Image: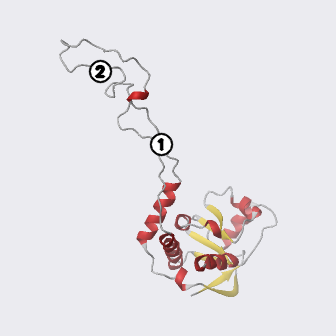
């Protein structure tokens, strides 16, 4: 499988890059994608939710009414969950939402996400580049040249580049990531995925390691 390589002006350089079929051309596994995205979102949850139970409410434990003659059930103390301001029954408590997922399942999910991008013609390869200074308008111009400016985009670099990162930081629909941090959620969350030549090589090597 081959894709054309473009420059940041959006022009075809005439060069082609060969994509590994075992990574970019597999039959996507939707269940693996579901599990990986579920784990990613669960791991990002803080789990700090908390409500006070009956034993944690400050208040008197005296009886609020007489034992008999009230015409109804005997009332409990002011901290009772059935009273306004009382403790909450089975309320949320701090917990860890993390769960384990096999490495091969996560790898299959990422391959499936990349294969979806290729099938949807939403994967663009650009030649390696560098911005001389952090300017957002230059980054916007690059996305416009590559026809990726109307939806969410993800640019994957082989290594951190401060100028590129700062140029895209203020754009709500643009993300920049290094190959080591690429995950299934980030791939699927973006409409367009832009890879540099070196990023393609590094991504392929990470799967074959």
Q: Nearer the viewer, residue 145 or 206?
A: 206
Rounded to the nearest angstrom, the CA distance separating label 1 from label 2 is 28 Å
Within the image, what quadrant is residue 196 found in? bottom right
- Residue linked to disc 2: 76
Residue 80: give its label.
none
Q: Secondary structure at mark 2?
A: loop
Name the residue: 73% across, 62% down: 137
Quarter containing the N terminus: bottom right
Q: Position of residue 197 (x, y in %)?
A: 69, 79
Name the residue: 39% across, 17% down: 60
Name the residue: 63% across, 72% down: 194
Q: Nearer the viewer, residue 115 or 64?
A: 64
Relative horizontal placement of residue 35, taking residue 171 as reference (left or right): left
Outermost residue to the right: 132
Question: Do we see residue 155 in this rendering?
Answer: no
Q: Position of residue 106 (x, y in %)?
A: 50, 69
Q: Secondary structure at mark 1?
A: loop
Relative horizontal placement of residue 28, taking residue 192 as reference (left or right): left
Q: Position of residue 145 (x, y in %)?
A: 68, 73
Name the residue: 75% across, 74% down: 129
Q: Nearer the viewer, residue 156 or 172?
A: 156
Within the image, what quadrant is residue 92 found in? top left
- Residue linked to disc 1: 94
Q: Nearer the viewer, residue 64 or 28?
A: 64
Marks 1,2: beta carbons within 8 A: no
Q: How many marks?
A: 2
Q: Position of residue 205 (x, y in %)?
A: 63, 79
Tell me: residue 14, above or below residue 9: below
Quarter containing the C terminus: bottom right
Tell me: residue 180, above or below residue 81: below
Q: How is the image coloured?
A: secondary structure
């Amino acid at each position: 499988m081959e894709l054309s390589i473009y420059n940041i002006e959006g022009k075809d350089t005439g060069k082609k890059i060969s994509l590994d079929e075992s990574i970019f051309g597999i039959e996507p596994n939707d269940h693996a994608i579901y599990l990986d995205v579920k784990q990613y979102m669960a791991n990002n949850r803080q789990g700090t939710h908390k409500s006070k139970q009956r034993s944690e409410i400050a208040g008197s434990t005296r009886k609020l009414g007489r034992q008999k003659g009230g015409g109804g059930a005997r009332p409990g103390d002011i901290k009772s969950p059935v009273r306004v301001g009382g403790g909450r029954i089975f309320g949320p408590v701090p917990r860890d939402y993390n769960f384990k997922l096999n490495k091969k399942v996560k790898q299959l999910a990422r391959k499936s996400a990349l294969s979806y991008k290729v099938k949807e013609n939403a994967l663009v390869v650009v030649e390696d580049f560098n911005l001389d200074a952090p300017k957002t308008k230059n980054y916007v111009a690059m996305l416009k040249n590559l026809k990726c400016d109307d939806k969410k985009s993800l640019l994957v670099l082989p290594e951190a580049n401060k100028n590129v990162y700062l140029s895209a930081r203020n754009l709500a629909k643009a993300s920049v990531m290094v190959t080591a941090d690429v995950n299934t959620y980030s791939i699927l969350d973006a409409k367009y995925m832009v890879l540099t030549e070196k990023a393609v090589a590094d991504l392929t090597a990470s799967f074959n390691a």
